[in-house]
Image: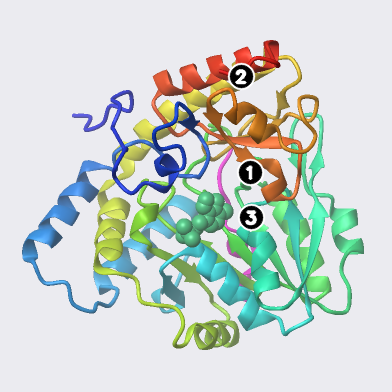
Amino acid sequence: MKDFNFDIPVDRCNTASLKWERYRDKDIIPLWVADMDFRSPTAVIDALGRRVEHGIFGYCVAPKSLNEVVVEMLGRRYGWQVDPEHLVWLPGLVCGLNVACRSVAAEHDDVMTMAPIYPPFLTAPVNSKQELVTVPLKPGKEKWEIDFVLLEQSITKKTRLLLFCSPQNPVGRVFNHEELVELVSICSKHDIIICSDEIHCDLILDADKKHIPTASISPEAAARTITLMAPSKTFNIPGLGCSFAVISNRNLKNKFLQAMQGIVPDVNIFGFTATEAAYRDGWDWLAGLLEYLRGNSLLVEQEIASMEGLAMHHVEATYLAWIDARKIDGKAPGRFFESFGVGLSEGSEFGLPGFVRLNFGCQRSLLQEALKRMKKAVTNKDAPV
Ligand SMILES: Cc1ncc(COP(=O)(O)O)c(C=O)c1O
């Protein structure tokens, strides 16, 4: 029996929700930060309940059974054989991006990424006093693409690391085998380490696409890749702070562990508990979620296409739509839509002003209302609600 109905609204007010607190007591629908307004799988909620009931919340280690579940899952879903010894548990992927910068590059080295991109990719190198090199993604006719020529031209003698996001937030691309092969080939040629953030890997919307872990494409790719993954986006548990790195290169793993020393806290017991339950028993829920998100995605694409001044590419993965609103406002269209009652993420934070990111991981009725407000905004620009 299905244990989910994604149409049922859940009141998140007064639950210390980052997403909902931003517009507390305001009539603005929050479609910004990437968490969803859906309850997690029953298996996760039940496992957490049992753990609370135990009543002792001491220091913890990743249980062997959890490592086994993760390794089994990576093999089954992605055909990727991972040694449990290569797992490093982390309290967050942003933390993983920052640790990757510190462990791979020295101060003043170059760290590359491709924009638009999830904002911490732009700040992690700067936090480590490294030079951020941003290569623009190309808006192709059908989809956003990697500009391999520009990527290679942007490499200098000081380039040590590429921060890569696959599937890509915010443009929603699922990178294919050819693209990954080319990326790895360029990085090999110039001896660049790849930090591949694959947090959205389970959220593939297009039935004809599949996620391919960058490290899985060849032994060469595995040797130069730090993979970052988590159950947090997939099962809507980002507040529990549990994620992991996969690093098969022993030298790289040691440097990564060293950079974490004394700074990165352990994952907490609820993060481990929820992760094991989700990866063991959350897959039917995920199938239902993906079906629902496909419906939301279609609705967003159809509605945006009908709105004057807005455009977007098809979303292949994630629950995020990246919308070109430059005809509305080339600098801060997010502010414009906020004044009409919809809270979106501003493109400038992702390195591309004039765009907005819309999170459609919410009940369809709320999404319909938000899209109605956006339509009203673009047709009646001078009259905020
Ligand atoms: C690409 C990407 N990486 C990392 C994160 C955040 O990860 P965490 O909450 O584990 O730090 C997000 C959240 O939206 C994301 O989209």
Query: Taking the image as drawn, is residue 45 in sight?
Result: yes
Say if 290 sits above or below 269 in the image. Answer: above
The residue nearer to you, when weighing 223 against 286, is: 286
The residue nearer to you, when weighing 57 against 174, is: 57
Say if 179 sits above or below 338 in the image. Answer: below
Query: Taking the image as drawn, is residue 198 in sight?
Result: no
In the image, is 269 to the left or to the right of 176? left
Which amino acid, by three-letter code, is at mark 3? Pro
Q: Earlier in the sequence, mark 2 or mark 3?
A: 3
Q: Are marks 3 and 1 in contact (CB under 8 Å)?
A: no
Say if 64 sits above or below 153 in the image. Answer: below
Q: Is mark 1 within 8 Å of ligand 1?
A: no
At a point 57% along the width and 57% down the height, the residue shown is 213
Can you tell which mark lies on residue 119? 3
Residue 160 in percent (x, y) is at: 76, 76
Q: Earlier in the sequence, mark 1 or mark 2?
A: 1
At a point 33% along the width and 69% down the height, the residue shown is 67
Asked if the magenta segment contains residue 334, the reply would be no
Q: State which region is magenta.
A: 209-223
Q: Residues within 10 Å of mark 1 (few under 14, many from 20)?
A: many
**Quarter of the rendering containing residue 161:** bottom right
The residue indicated by pointer 2 is 384
Which amino acid, by three-letter code, is at mark 1? Pro
Say if 121 sits above or below 363 in the image. Answer: below
The residue indicated by pointer 1 is 170
The residue nearer to you, when weighing 294 against 354, is: 354
Residue 101 in percent (x, y) is at: 65, 75
Residue 271 in percent (x, y) is at: 30, 62
Q: Secondary structure at mark 3?
A: loop
Q: Earlier in the sequence, mark 3 or mark 1?
A: 3
